[in-house]
Amino acid sequence: MSQTGYASGQTAEKAEESEESEDDELPILPRQSIPDSELSPQYWFLLKVVKYIKFGSPTATLLALCGLSRYDLTLPMCQQALENSEAVDVLINVLEAEDHKCKVAALRVLQNLVKIQHFQRLLVIKSGIATVVRLLSEAEPDVRCLAAGTLAHAVNNHRSRMLTRKAGAVPLLVDLLDIQSGPMIVTTDEFNFKAATKQKIQAATAAAKALRSLSYSASARRELYLAGGIPLLTRLTLSIGGQREYQHLNSSLGTTNRAPSVASTDVFRASVKADILLGQLLRHMRYDCEQLQTLCASTIAHFAEDETNRKVLTQLKATETLVWVLKQEKPQVNIPLLKAVSTAVWKLSLSPEARDRFRQLGIVRIFIRHLNQPTEEVLLPIVSSISVIGTDQENLALLRTERAVPRFVWLLSGNHPGLLSAAALTMANLTADVDALELLETIDAARLLWSLLKHPSPVVQAGAASAIAAFSERSKRAGEVARSLVGGLELLVSLLRAPELEVVTAAAAAVARMATEDETLAVLSDHHVVSLLASLVRHKNRDLKLRVAEAIAECCRWPGNPAQLGQGGGVKPLIGYLRSSHLDLRRAAAKALHQVSSDRENCFILHHHGAVMLLLKLVGCGDVEIQSAAAGCLSNIRNFIHNA
């Protein structure tokens, strides 16, 4: 690792530790106490049980722990009794004793107790995390298994993850994953297991659950990698028939609800990028186990962010598997499964091959049925997938005939940035369908898009500007709508000053389309749009250069704008566009220079900086539009220079 990378890793770790410390002092929320007059005999009996655990002999302690494990700890009466008797402190003390049977019994009680959030915080405050971590190195397998299971439930916030990691839990949990050195073959028939093997499998499952909880921490993921945990998780994921014992192992492969850190994610992907692993994940999705399907889909979605993995997944027919899962008829929709699978579809559809295959499998029709989901987190991958996949005429017509268009318009009134952007891009696609465009005009969808330009999120601004560009290109009423909105065109021009590249690119595209109408062009010119375009000509991004050249070609039709562009220093950089290897950029530059050359001073600039020879070459190219624009520009230069 380079010094820069190492420093970045240290900085990221310090930042994460600082973040993990944010809730160090979070108080335990006060519990609603039950009045003494309403306390049942069960309450007083539990107080005695805890007292026997604390002061009794090993035999009495064991019997009391066994009796305590029979109670329903979710009952408020039981929780109040255990809190008032300081049961967590007592259990921690038992774990520090030497009696093996008492340790096992105490861990069974504690494992159930820490499923309750209140007692999770108590375990952290009472310094019980370190005690449980020490038990991971015990010789007895049942103690290690129960300790790992306890951590899986207890480690669910920044502070507990930090304490668990600093106590050295990650390498110890990784050791539990190492069931055997040979290939891992697992069957779901428990009678085929030897007792020792079954115990190892239970310990590995508990360790995987704990690592899943810890994997929310970037530092823990780095330790998992350094401890050699990734090959072990991969091997266990490749086990045969492990849909029950190993359904938690996939979740330890870095699939968290948060964005993973860049450093750990890149290293991890490089370690597990194997056809056989991705193929096994797809085979696991064929099991009739929704939780396993959810975890596998989440893992596939994570790996599908990499272009190489997308190609591998497409070759392994991941598209067919994902669609197969979505087509399974269930009495009730499994929301986590739907979210995981639709996210995998969204990420995988970034590949053109997968996108085409999804279209053939009719996935847009499937997603249309789920557009009524009330949760934005579920709608986001669904609408995003439709915005990427549903761009062909057949699917656009399907969205219209299935009455999905009003739903997308309704989504524009929400607040989720990603969902707003995806809905806007879908509406941009819908403008390519004549009937859908007419429907959008009827329900006045364009006004909602213009209002989104004021949204604080750059993602929303870019999506809205792209949709406005599509409307302006295909709708006859786009200019009228834009001019009727007070300050709308001024707001669009102001986005050319935005620091985000995608916002500026989308705004330039919208300006290029809006400027085709003379009335709209007059308003844009009043807001000095050409001066802003001149400041963007020197940018290195090809897409932005293309949109800026197109906008200049349209805006310089207005009198005075060519001179304004020349005064802003925008003519000379345009000459360099003519050398581009991309035909569309050369075409846009030739058109822009044709309009720019209507100003005398600009012609001198073009002549002085060698534009004539470049234009002469373009006159002989095979593109008619480029030929016409280059010839017109040369004619203007000749006239002005000859008459000078």
Image (tube, rainbow, N blue to C red):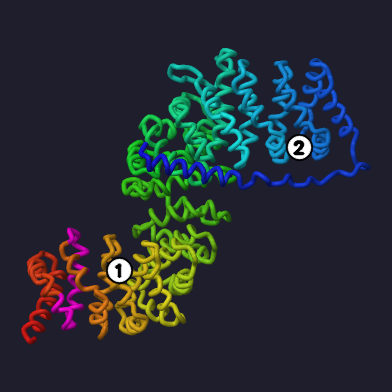
**Above or below 551: residue 300:** above
Which quadrant would residue 574 be assigned to in this image?
bottom left
> Residue 338, can we see it?
no
What residue is shown with label 2? 74
Instruction: Name above or below for residue 551 compared with residue 579.
Output: below
Report how far apart the C-alphas of labels 2 and 1 lie in the structure.
Answer: 63 Å
From the top left corner, tell me how far across and down residue 218 is, in percent. 50, 40
For label 2, the crowd category at 10 Å Cα-Cα, with few meaning under 14, some 14 to 19 and many 20 or more, is few
559 versus 436 height, above or below? below
Kind of residue at disc 2: Thr
Q: Split into 4 quadrants, where in the image is the N terminus?
A: top left
Callout 2: helix, strand or loop? loop
Q: Which mark is residue 536?
A: 1
Of 111 and 313, nearer the camera is 111
Give the magenta range.
580-605
Q: Nearer the viewer, mark 2 or mark 1?
A: 1
Residue for point 26% across, 66% down:
538
Sequence order check, earlier mark of 2 and 1: 2
| Residue sitting at x 34%, y 44% | 307
Amino acid under disc 1: Leu
558 and 414: which one is in front?
A: 558
Q: Residue 608, can we see it?
A: yes
Q: Quadrant of the C terminus?
A: bottom left
Quadrant hosting residue 543: bottom left
- Most common secondary structure along the magenta stretch: helix
